[in-house]
Image: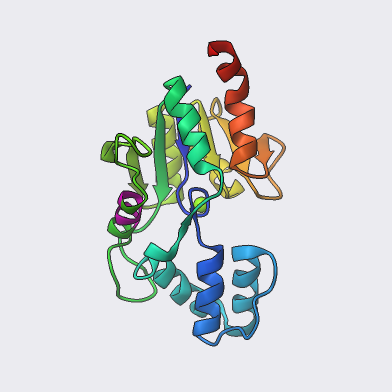
Amino acid sequence: MFIGIDFDNTIARYDDLFARLALESGYLETVPPGGKTAVRDAVRQRHGDGAWQLMQAEAYGSRMAEAELMPGFLGFVGSARRLGVPLVVVSHKSVFSNAVPGPNLRYAALAWMRAKRFFDPGGLGFHVDDIYFEGTRAEKAARISELGCTHFIDDLPEVFAEKSFPAETVRILLGATGGDGNDTVMADWFEIRDFMFTDLERAVA
Ligand SMILES: [Mg+2]
């Protein structure tokens, strides 16, 4: 087993931050239920994609510190570490926002990870070399292939649909509807942990 994991909206949760940004900027007067996707759709519909781009630049840049860890992720990592299953993060993330000048988005993500104890041996136990940022979705899929991930976990079915996405990698789609029938759809990290580790943990107990 060699598990690859997406970053934005898979490990880092922006639902509350996007809701806050939509209210602060005056794009929305109330927040629709349905998390990040509902906020995105409402902002795009009323103010266009440019407004959404600006909000993303803030969320993934200057306001990144306000993002949260996705519920259940810590438990998943704990099980992986106990079982000795290696984890890598492969993220499609540009260096800078295309919408507006601002901070280096990759540094912002790494700083957030550091603050969440990703790189502490007594924390999540990642090494900085376990984190890959790629400039395009195709490059991300190629990286997953090159690393030889046996499983990849992502919130976007578009990643799995990339031509360069390796056929032999198990596709685990987090909390999304859709997928093309080749994807294993999981509601949250608690379900992913059960799916991947419960039998292994019983076997070593
Ligand atoms: Mg994502």
Numbered disc total: 0
On screen, residue 42 versus residue 117, left or right, reads right
On screen, residue 137 versus residue 194, left or right, reads left
**Colour theme:** rainbow
Who is closer to the viewer here, 84 or 174? 84
| Rendering coords of residue 158 (x, y %) | 58, 49
For the stretch drawn in magenta, the main secondary structure is helix
| Rendering coords of residue 20 (x, y %) | 52, 75
- In this orientation, does residue 123 appear? yes
Which residue is painted at 52% across and 54% down in the image?
9
Which residue is painted at 46% across and 40% down in the image?
141
- In this orientation, does residue 60 appear? no
The region drawn magenta spans 109-114
Q: Quadrant of the C terminus?
A: top right
Q: Is residue 81 above or below residue 114?
A: above
Which residue is painted at 51% across and 62% down in the image?
14
| Quadrant of residue 32 within the rendered picture | bottom right
Q: Is residue 197 above or below residue 99?
A: above
| Rendering coords of residue 39 (x, y %) | 61, 71
Q: Please tell me whether residue 118 belongs to the stretch shown in magenta.
A: no
| Rendering coords of residue 164 (x, y %) | 48, 37
Who is closer to the viewer here, 162 or 200? 200
